[in-house]
Image (cartoon, rainbow, N blue to C red):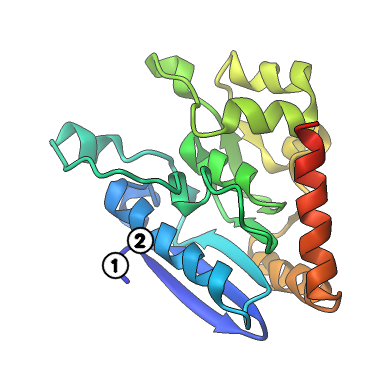
Amino acid sequence: LEYCRVDKADHVMTVTLNRPDRLNALHPPANVELGTVFDDCASDDDLWVAIITGEGRGFSAGNDLRYQAEGGERVATPRGFGGLTSRFDLAKPVIAAVNGVAMGGGFEIALACDIIIASDAATFALPEPRVGLAALAGGLQRLPRQIGSKRALGMILTGRHVPASEGYELGFVNKVVPADELLATAREWAGMICACAPLSVRASKDVVYRSLDM
């Protein structure tokens, strides 16, 4: 794998975004690669939970605009950002272990996960309106559903940066921990999920998301 690292142990797949020189900003080839990684997670009966995190200072700075500006090849990414934002059929739980900056598409990846554990150094934003864009990889749908429209619009219309502690108060972060405890805490939560019956977990996740559409 070129743009991420994958570790599998104890029914848990840990995916580490690995473009630290670009704060793990993702370009189409990385999104395609991550799509295949999560396809593998979906089809592997031995994997029950996934964790996604970032190498270095950032979780993900979102879309790699430099790659685009340099004329990088555009490739169809049917599974969306991080192989997750357009994936609506993954029954297995995914935990985002947000270690640093989660901006734009990076925040949208975290929002597409089921649980967000954040380092106290993490920052979240949908800054697209500041550069004439909109968060169209699910952010505009998922954030209001997760925290309510007024709170969500307070972030969306201003593009402001929200620290992990405020993310917890707003309700999109499940837990904030010191940076050096982040992965251990994410693995602890994964372990608690793995201690439950896997089919019950998947059915429960499925019902929750289907109910949001009803």
- Whether tag 2 and tag 1 are in contact, CB under 8 A, the answer is yes
Name the residue rendered at 85%, 75% in the picture.
197
Q: Nearer the viewer, mark 2 or mark 1?
A: 2
Name the residue rendered at 63%, 42% in the picture.
111
In this rendering, would 40 be left or right of 156? left
Residue 45, image quadrant: bottom right
The one nearer the camera, 67 or 10, is 10
Mark 1: secondary structure: loop
Q: Give the x, y percent position of residue 58.
A: 47, 51
Kindly identify the amino acid type of the residue bearing the numbered disc 1: Glu
Which residue is tagged 2?
33
Determine whether 203 is above or below 184 in the image. Answer: above
Q: Residues within 10 Å of mark 2 (few under 14, many from 20)?
A: some
The one nearer the camera, 213 or 167, is 213
Among numbered discs 2 and 1, the one appearing first in the sequence: 1
Which residue is tagged 1?
2
Location of the C terminus (image quadrant): top right
Q: Give the x, y percent position of residue 7.
A: 51, 79
Q: Give the x, y percent position of residue 76.
A: 30, 43
Q: Residues within 10 Å of mark 1 (few under 14, many from 20)?
A: few
Question: Which residue, as the protein is rendered here, is positioned at the far bottom?
Answer: 10
Q: Which mark is residue 79?
A: none
